[in-house]
Image (cartoon, helix red, strand yellow):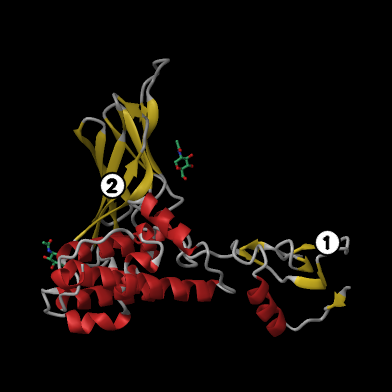
Amino acid sequence: MCLALLGLSWGMWDLFAHVFAFPGGNKGLCGVMKLLSLSWGRPCAAPSGSPCTPPGSWMACCVCPTVTPCPQPSRAVPFPAWDPRPAHLSRLSGKCFSLVESTYKYELCPFHNVTQHEQTFRWNAYSGILGIWHEWEITNNTFRGMWMRDGDACQSRSRQSKVELTCGKSNRLAHVSEPSTCVYALTFETPLVCHPHSLLVYPTLPTVLQQRWDQLEQDLVDELITAQGYEKSLRAIFEDAGYLKTSEPSESAQRDRATKDLQFETLESCQEAHKALSQEIERLQGVLTHHGVPYGKPAETPSSEHWGPQTPTAGIAEPLRGDPGLRGDTL
Ligand SMILES: *[C@@H]1O[C@H](CO)[C@@H](O)[C@H](O)[C@H]1NC(C)=O
Ligand SMILES: *[C@@H]1O[C@H](CO)[C@@H](O)[C@H](O)[C@H]1NC(C)=O
């Protein structure tokens, strides 16, 4: 028996997909799947199709013309314009600036690398990399310098350089020093940082990250998070902006694993859900931290069994406020 189901409407197909839970449905694959036929206990007959239900049930025969991995809400692609360069400084990239000091010529290519070339006719003149673009140093919400790391080996480590941007009449590599062995300090002058606000981080962030930061400030004032939690969340914002390298790859890997089983039709819905979940996690962690309740990483409690009926829910924050008895009562 073979039911011809060509032309099945999308709504019905959705229902079907949910009822039969075809493989691929939870493998993070998106695609316009076309159902060719449905039969009981019989393999897929259509040459171009392949089975899309588990064996031993109704056999659906499908073609998947454009199956691509679903956009996952990962840190790697949080926003369309993921870029470590604040807009007003981006015009420095692709350019290089050099400085000759005693026997060395130093070259700085902002957002790319720092190199050093010995100015001599010796056959073995040193020429090497003092650092490759890594991340910003941010303190007090201000861009303090560009870190260029993983340069050429130097004793047991690799060379690294910190480039400080200061106001100057023209773009110029003004000074190079080596404050400690194999760590270089460069001063780069540019008119691009002469405005008193030009090195502030907040104005350079996309709106969605500014809103997260606003919320963070509010949570700090409301004592929903500790100063430590604030610092951590702020760092996450800078990481999402691309200004800092992700510090805990294992944590984001866990997050990716946790979200792997969710499937979304569009990148927008992925991002929406991810944002909502992240905010909820942050908020709940804030509540727990606030009350001194130790907690594990989300991945360590994959099922709700651990928590039983006392799973913290959205409504619990208010009653807990100022209630130091939480720990004894519930855990
Ligand atoms: C340094 O960066 C510049 C600009 O991107 C590039 O042309 C050059 O090849 C790089 N040098 C090294 C040694 O990577
Ligand atoms: C932090 O930055 C603000 C604004 O630029 C400045 O007024 C303040 O003095 C700075 N504080 C510290 C401790 O550097």
Crowding near the residue tagged with mark 2, few <14, some 14–19, many ≥20 C-alpha atoms within 10 Å: many
| Residue depicted at 88% across the width and 63% down the height | 45
Residue at x 31% of width, y 33% of height: 159
| Label 2 element class | strand
* Viewer-closest of 53 and 32: 53
Q: Measured from the top left, where is residue 171 in percent x and y?
A: 33, 53
Q: Nearer the viewer, mark 1 or mark 2?
A: 1
Which quadrant of the view contains residue 125? Answer: top left
Q: In terms of secondary structure, where does tag 1 sit?
A: loop
Q: Is mark 1 within 8 Å of ligand 1?
A: no
x, y percent for residue 186:
26, 43
Residue type marked 1: Pro
Quadrant in the rendering for residue 90: bottom left
Q: Residue shown at 27%/57% (left/top)?
A: 169
Q: Quadrant of the N terminus?
A: bottom right
Residue 199 visible in the shown view: no
Say if 177 sits above or below 211 in the image.
above
Q: CA distance from mark 1 to mark 2?
A: 64 Å
In the displayed structure image, the side of residue 321 where residue 195 appears, left or right: right
Regarding ligand 2, which quadrant of the image does it lie in? bottom left
Which sits in the foreground, 219 or 119? 219
Residue 118: percent from the left, percent from the top? 35, 26
Which residue sits at x=38%, y=46%? Answer: 133
Relative horizontal placement of residue 323, taking residue 109 as reference (left or right): left
Q: Amino acid at mark 2?
A: Val
User: Mark 2 = which residue?
Assistant: 163
Whether residue 164 appears in this view of the structure is yes
Q: Which numbered disc, 1 or 2, marks the residue that appears first in the sequence?
A: 1
Q: Is residue 252 left or right of residue 155?
A: right
Report which residue position mark 1 lands on. Answer: 43
Front-lying residue, 177 or 54: 54
